[in-house]
Image (cartoon, rainbow, N blue to C red):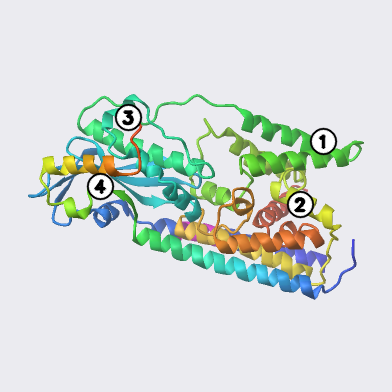
Amino acid sequence: VSKKKNYMGIQFLLILLFVFIIIHLTENIRKVKYNSRNPINSYSVPPKSYQVDTLEQNDSKIDTLWKDSEFSDPFRK
Amino acid sequence: VKRNKQKAEWILAIFALITIAFSWYIGKKLKISEVDQSVFKVLPYHESKIQRMENGVYKVTSNDLATVFLTTGTGKGYAGPIKVLVGYSHSKTITSINILDSKETTSYLQKVFNRKYLENFHSLHLSRLNRLNFSPDAISGATRTSEGIAQAIKSATSKLANYHSIDFEPEDVPQPVSFGKKEIIVLLLFVLGLLARVKSFRLKEHLTWTTLILGLIFLGFVYNEPISMTRIHSLLLGFWPSWHNELHIYFLVFGVAIILLTTGKNPYCHAMCPLGASQKLLGKIGHAKTVNLKQKYFWVWMQRSFAWISILLALIFRNPAISEYEIHSALFQFTGTHWLFLIMGLTIIISIFVSKPWCNFLCPIRAIFDFMHLFRKKLKRIKR
């Protein structure tokens, strides 16, 4: 075990780490606050342009959208 | 001088407890029922009529569009409940999924979206979700978050099924208690860790290294389940994990707390913590030396103050992940903000030359263990 010393270099790095932590926390709070104001509209069909479609048109368009999309429905294959 | 120092520590500990209780109250008071408001916020049908039906089902009618339904559902994520709003077409297929509220770390949630997990539920009919017990593969590195979302969608769907009087598996099916690999590993680590702390044990050093390496592999890289601030915040906020399938969390957190409070020995930091293990290994490589700073108390109180602030923020915002600054997710799962990666990188570099810098100067869990030690000492003194 070393004697009690100042170790200025280490103290400087520790201060740097605490500063990074403060920035990280501030960013985190900002992100969470933003998300709570704007719920993550992660996935939504029908898109707005189809909103005025009639019921049948709407459904057939969803089907077409689905077939054209790069994702596959595991149950439809 | 020593007595004065102890007195000051005790007064500050009481102050911390009072402020923690107070911020819990503020958080509770500030948190209004936001779900209803969020429903309107995410709703794309601006000119529609929205009626709130029974069981949290919203009926949306408009002149131009067929009646659609919206329901909210909740699932258990890693850090707490995840609330979703699911939209269904008139033919009861899923048309939209919105995350209304979540306590998950943003980077985990982002991972789930980036891998397009929600697309798995695209156009699924209500009955399929039930009959096939549909659960797409969880996203590795964000398993609990993805499972929580799937659970929330299913819970929302069950409400709509109920509303239409369609047979649907009950939402809360009693699950059997699962005792698996994780539980066995945690118990094994406890036994080995306690053995390693017996002074007269001959193979003490070897055993300590064995438990540390096991902890690093399993609690770190394989399961990423160390005792974290997010976990502590979740417990304080009442977001307790299901003991049926996450018994290992109870073993780990309460096991450590009980051993620490009864024996005064800390079985976690010295023998189980994956972060401690990684720093010890790095220190071995660089022959790191133990640093004894002149301003020791300043740094000890910095460490404690940050832990205290982290708890206060989590309680005020009622979000366990909001004030997490530990580096395990960056180190073991490669998930986190770029600041977190920077903190991790710097810590790794320092660990090569200085013995366990994270544990000694930054770890908030260590500060909590210090508080428990103090509490134990005080109780002992009162008993006498």
The residue tagged with tag 4: helix, strand or loop? loop
Query: Is the same chain shared between marks 3 and 1?
Result: no
The residue that appears at 47% across and 38% down in the rendered structure is: B138
Q: Chain of mark 2?
A: B
Q: Which mark is residue B17?
A: none
Q: Residues within 10 Å of mark 3 (few under 14, many from 20)?
A: few
Q: Nearer the viewer, mark 2 or mark 4?
A: 4
Q: Can residue A70 be seen in the rendering of this structure?
A: yes
Q: Secondary structure at mark 3?
A: loop
Same-chain check, marks 4 and 1: no
Crowd band around label 2 with a 10 angstrom C-alpha radius: few (<14), some (14–19), many (20+): few
The residue identified by callout 1 is: B195
Residue B381: mark: 2
Query: Which three-letter amino acid code belongs to the residue tagged 1?
Result: Leu
Give how far apart the Cα atoms at labels 3 and 2 are: 71 Å
Tell me which numbered mark, 3 or 4, is placed earlier along the sequence.
Answer: 4
Residue, x 35% and y 25% (percent of image)?
A: B132
Cα distance, mark 1 to mark 2?
28 Å
Residue at image mark 3: A77
> x, y (%) of residue B348?
72, 59
**Residue drawn at x 22%, y 41% as measured from the top left:** A64
Q: Which residues are magenta?
A: B19-26
Q: Nearer the viewer, mark 4 or mark 1?
A: 4
Q: Is the C-beta separation of discs 4 and 1 under 8 Å?
A: no
Depth order, front residue of B378/B321: B321
Q: Distance of mark 2 from mark 4, alpha carbons?
A: 65 Å
Q: Is residue B25 magenta?
A: yes
Q: Measured from the top left, where is residue B101 in percent x and y?
A: 38, 51
Residue A23 percent across, percent down from the top left = 56, 69
Name the front one of labels 3 and 2. Answer: 3
